[in-house]
Amino acid sequence: MSRLRALWQASLNATKRALTWNVDDLIPPSEKSIFNFNSKEELKRWHLYSDSEYGGLSSASLEINNFGNGLKGIFSGHLSLDVAEDSKWNIRRGGFCGMRSKKFDGFIDLDAYDSIALKLKGDGRCYISTIYTENWVNSPGQHEDNSWQAFVFVPKDNWYIAKIPLARYLPTWRGNVIDAELEMNPSRILGMSLSVNAEGGVPGAKSGPGDFRVELEWIKALRTE
């Protein structure tokens, strides 16, 4: 086949493919993996925080371990309401820990999805799922990311897939819900976190100071509609 004929045939084939496109080709997959705790490399994507940064006595750790059914993430620690006597911070009590992802390389776009799903095995406590988006709510000059939070109740001792509609995430500032009509921009997501407080949460969940532990397999975005 001559070169000219080969080019003509390639062009014809491309035209045929363009004319026979399927609408399904334009629809993103029904789920998008965001985090998968099946490798110790995943630890590099997260950092821990707690009230100990402000004089509290709570502590937390994040590990990747294999208990016979594959590698899983374990976020665990101890919640304390006490504050160090020599603390220079003006806080009356502690009682929180969290794991926050490092910022994504740019943004991730979840505009095609309507829910966040987490596969967890917990301790009966209520955790807080947070999504961080590009700052457009706060005043100019403030460099904090906007945060959107939702409760996640994790039943004790059984693997559970928690599905949280994005519409359920409320805008917050330093842990307090912003009393305003605001809407998340899911196309400009910078990172996520999972945290736990000694107090608050949903009715029926375990609360109070003491140990906490939750295992994580993955975090995904879902399109359920």
Image (cartoon, rainbow, N blue to C red):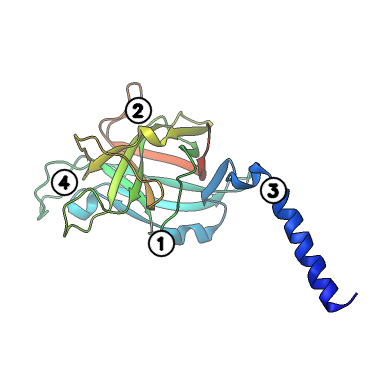
Identify the mark nearer the N-term, 3 or 1. 3
Disc number lying in front (3 or 4): 3
Mark 1 or mark 4, which is nearer the start of the sequence? 4
Estimate the x, y position of residue 19 in percent, counting from the top left.
Answer: 71, 50
In the rendered view, tell whether residue 125 sits above or below residue 217. above
Question: Residues under labels 3 and 2: Cα distance?
Answer: 53 Å
**Which residue does the image show at 32% across and 22% down from the upper left?**
203
Badge 2 element: loop
Disc 3 residue type?
Answer: Trp
Label 3 vs label 1, nearer the camera? 3
User: What is the crowding at mark 3: few (fewer than 14 residues within 10 Å), some, or many (at least 20)?
Assistant: few
Q: Position of residue 127 (x, y in %)?
A: 36, 36
Q: Is residue 196 above or below residue 73?
A: above
Q: Which residue is mark 3?
A: 21
* Residue bearing the label numbered 4: 83
Q: Which residue is mark 2?
A: 206
109 sits left or right of 135 in the view: right
Q: Check disc 1: other Cα within 10 Å, few if <14, some if 14-19, many if 20+.
A: few
Of the residues shown, which amino acid type is indicated by label 2? Lys
What residue appears at the point 58 percent right and 40 percent down from the top-left corner?
30
Tell me which numbered mark, 2 or 4, is placed earlier along the sequence: 4
What residue appears at the point 20 percent right and 43 percent down from the top-left corner? 94
Q: Residue at x 41, y 29 (%)?
A: 124
Give the mark nearest the N terminus, 1 or 2: 1
Badge 3 marks a residue whose secondary structure is: loop
Circle on res. 141: none
Q: Marks 4 and 1, how far apart in space?
A: 37 Å
Between circles 3 and 2, the one closer to the viewer is 3
Which numbered disc, 3 or 2, marks the residue that appears first in the sequence? Answer: 3
Q: Give the quadrant of residue 10.
A: bottom right
Tag 4 secondary structure: loop
